[in-house]
Image (cartoon, rainbow, N blue to C red):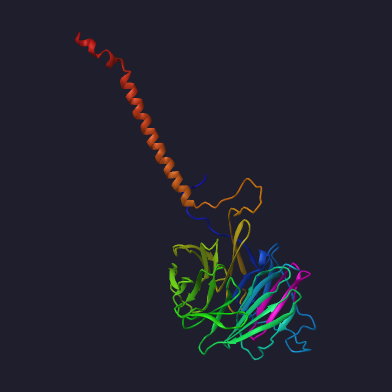
């Protein structure tokens, strides 16, 4: 039986991906949802989501470290930051890993494995731990290159570009003011860089060609351990000392505080947008991730993590018919699996120019259906009462007793 009054569909567990014997601090889906990568102090793990099998990372002799003729193997542990991109020219997925030693590693997916292409540090020798990595665009058209940005604990922000053949060139290296810790860097829709400071409530926009500051805002949350910026650069979720908060990016005002329990562990926890920005998924220190409604801040569902403890890493991806959520634990020196959750959805089809299709799929909110149902019920009641009244009137008019009533007095 279909329940028209059921308010929300819930996520269901899809599978468990066997993870490392150490904490996972960040997760990322690749373009097209083909791979999932998990990183942390113990190293990097990658899975092919078509068969849920692990993808090996192979270090070959001859990989470079930024110095001419260097053949040192890349660091294989301590990855605090990651990002995926996809080169259409070669139909190739590329994984970028930032390390605690300041390296940026670029791994190509070749022959069912990831092979290190470049382990580089041009211009950033001596820089400290990588904090954040981002790419623009995520899917690189034929004949163009990808922009790369990396931030470091040394207050530096590196911007460069990467071609499909693996050629990387540094463009600018910016050193920010004292006290500005560039905890999160993201490209905006125009390809410029947005930098979120961990402390002080400061956000700056940098010209990706020159490194010049385009604008500066100082009314953001005073503490931002992690930041998730939506694709349209309209809203962001910050992990603050009070929990997750949803902010309007343009007006820089707090729009939602989510229903969440008090924080027990003051450690960074990631959040992400899902379901076309109507939901926010956030990690917790209570052996679960939580789903919130981005429109009203209400708690919706607990995504349990069976291995318990701290859950720092979450990630989301939308396929043609599913919303996917990845959740991972951050328990040091213990097995940490990745749990995949899913929720089915109706494919969202947009008419293409020149399309001759006669049928389209539309997203209809459930409360619309309930409203129509209530209106139909009300109309049915009105029509039924009207028919009863009309029927009673007709009975009275045609009653033999009424027609012969005057005969009793003749």
Quadrant of the frame with the C terminus: top left
The picture quadrant where one finds residue 56 is bottom right
Q: Farthest left residue?
A: 409
Going 76% across and 80% down the picture, which residue do you hit?
59
Residue 376: percent from left, percent from top? 44, 41
Is residue 10 visible to us here?
yes
Going 59% across and 50% down the picture, which residue do you hit?
361
Residue 245: percent from left, percent from top? 46, 71
The picture quadrant where one finds residue 212 is bottom right
Residue 22: percent from left, percent from top? 62, 78
Query: Which region shows up in magenta?
Result: 90-115
Given residues 13 and 391, the one toward you in this image is 391
Given residues 201 and 370, the one toward you in this image is 201
Q: Farthest bottom residue?
A: 126
The picture quadrant where one finds residue 140 is bottom right
Whether 407 is among the magenta residues is: no
Vertical side of 49 occupied by 177: above or below: below
Q: Main secondary structure of the magenta part?
A: strand
Going 58% across and 70% down the picture, which residue do you hit?
189
């Amino acid at each position: 039986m279909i329940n028209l009054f059921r308010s929300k569909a819930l996520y269901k567990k899809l599978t468990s991906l066997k993870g490392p014997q150490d904490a996972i601090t960040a997760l990322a889906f690749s373009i097209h949802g083909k791979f999932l990568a998990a990183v942390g102090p113990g190293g990097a793990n990658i899975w092919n989501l078509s068969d849920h099998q692990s993808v090996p990372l192979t270090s070959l002799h001859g990989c470079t470290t930024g110095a001419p003729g260097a053949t040192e193997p890349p660091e294989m542990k301590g990855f605090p930051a990651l990002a995926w991109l996809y080169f259409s020219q070669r139909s190739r997925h590329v994984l970028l890993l930032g390390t605690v030693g300041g390296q940026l590693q670029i791994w190509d997916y070749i022959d069912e494995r990831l092979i290190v292409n470049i382990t580089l540090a041009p211009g950033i020798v001596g820089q400290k731990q990588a904090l954040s990595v981002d790419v623009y665009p995520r899917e690189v058209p034929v004949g163009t290159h990808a922009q790369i940005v990396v931030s470091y604990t040394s207050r530096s922000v590196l911007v460069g570009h990467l071609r499909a053949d693996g050629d990387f060139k540094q463009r600018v290296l910016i050193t920010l003011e004292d006290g500005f810790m560039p905890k999160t860097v993201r490209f905006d829709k125009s390809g410029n860089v947005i930098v979120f400071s961990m402390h002080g409530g400061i956000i700056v926009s940098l010209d990706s060609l020159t490194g010049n500051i385009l604008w500066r805002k100082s009314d953001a949350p005073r503490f931002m351990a992690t930041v998730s910026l939506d694709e349209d650069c309209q809203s962001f979720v910050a992990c603050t000392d009070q929990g997750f908060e949803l902010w309007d990016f343009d007006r820089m005002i707090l729009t939602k505080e989510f229903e969440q329990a008090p924080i027990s562990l003051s450690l960074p926890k990631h959040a992400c947008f899902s379901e076309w920005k109507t939901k926010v998924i956030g990690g917790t220190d209570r052996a679960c991730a939580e789903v919130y409604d981005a429109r009203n801040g209400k708690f919706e569902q607990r995504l349990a993590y069976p291995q318990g403890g701290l859950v720092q890493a979450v990630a989301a991806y939308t396929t043609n018919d599913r919303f996917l959520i990845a959740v991972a634990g951050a328990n040091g020196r213990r097995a940490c699996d990745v749990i995949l959750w899913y929720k089915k959805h109706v494919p969202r089809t947009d008419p293409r120019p020149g399309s001759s299709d006669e049928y389209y799929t539309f997203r209809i909110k459930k409360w619309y259906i309930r409203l129509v149902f209530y209106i139909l019920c009300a109309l049915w009641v009105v029509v039924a009462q009207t028919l009863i009244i009309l029927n009673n009137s007709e009975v009275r008019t045609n009653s033999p007793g009424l027609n012969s009533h005057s005969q009793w007095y003749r």
